[in-house]
Amino acid sequence: MKSNQETKFKNTFEEEVYEGLTAFPKYLSSKYFYDKKGDKLFQKIMALPEYYLTECERTIIEENKADISNLFSGDAGFDLVELGAGDGKKTKILLQELIETKRNFTYKPIDISQNVLDELEEDVLNRWPSINIETEQGTYFNILKKLSEQQKDRKMVIVVLGSNIGNLPHKYAVEFLTTIRKSMQPEDLLFMGFDQKKDPQVILNAYNDSQGVTEEFNKNLLSRINEEMNANFDLQKFNHWPVYDPENGTTKSYLVSTEDQTVTLQNLDLDIHFSAWESIHTEISQKYDDVIVNWLAQEAGLVVEKQYSDPKNYFTDYIFRIK
């Protein structure tokens, strides 16, 4: 096995896979779930009965869309900047409200997946041919930095739906929010979803659905490595294993090797040995309450302006301003 310094990486994906699989304990970043197949699988997950997050947030936006639209609007119009736009299913409820009430805005969805952005733009323009939409492919912060430098006399509303922040431990969540805050002007808003603490079984079911779609979603990362790095992961030799810790509100997902085995990544000239029952950490999903959210906001220099919850209090969307 070559050292990291000797290995020539074609892209960041290769480099981060190398780093994760040669670490102890092993890990892979969930951001690489989202290739073309992964995008489709996540859309299936969002439609699952166990995956309550999507329906809860959809209900919040549907029931409060008029109030949210009023808060978003500015005298000179505004830019609606969505980080991790995905298929924009819930955002389209807001778009419909903004168009019906003749708000002056430009929709700027950002996503790491160009495939998702292309599909989103096509669908949005089919529904509302006159809408101003400017898609941006790339990492959140690079695009946000560019957009904030362009912001002069126009309000920016940054939208992060689906509790995407839950993919980060608290330390990195503060850094994430701080970076967003640095891109904001005093009149700008941040609209962000946070999955709430609740019955642990409800949470666990959301990451271990009865149809096995979440398992397929996690294992698709191994399939992607096989395809893009000429590797030989046998997906049948790994179990998908989610766990939830109600004390700290952390859900983690693992792929667990069911036997001693060695996997070869030919493009990286890399052999990786797995002991029986050794794990690869693939995903984290943090759960919150108002105390934690307010603490995160304070640490990042933000303050909660308003919040909206679904009838079961499973999920909350918060609106933040600069403190």
Image (cartoon, rainbow, N blue to C red):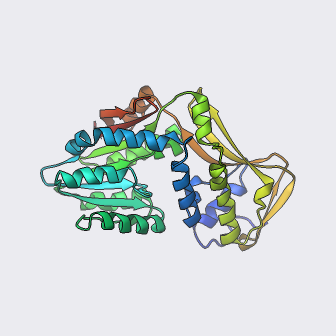
Dividing the picture into quarters, in which one does residue 16 lie? bottom right
Residue 31 to residue 319: above or below: below
Whether 52 is drawn above or below 180: the answer is above
Point 51% across, 55% down: residue: 43
| Left or right: residue 296 compared with residue 227 | left
Q: Position of residue 131 (x, y in %)?
A: 24, 64
Picture quadrant of residue 84: bottom left
Q: Quadrant of the C terminus?
A: top left
Residue occupying image coordinates x 64% and y 42%: 208
Residue 119, position as x, y percentages in the image: 42, 67
Counting labels gives 0
Tell whether 29 sits left or right of 291. Answer: right
Work out which residue is located at the far left of the displayed protein and give it.
75
30, 149: nearer the viewer: 30
Direction right: furthest residue? 260
Residue 214 visible (yes or no): yes
**Looking at the picture, how far across and down is residue 283, in whole percent?**
61, 47
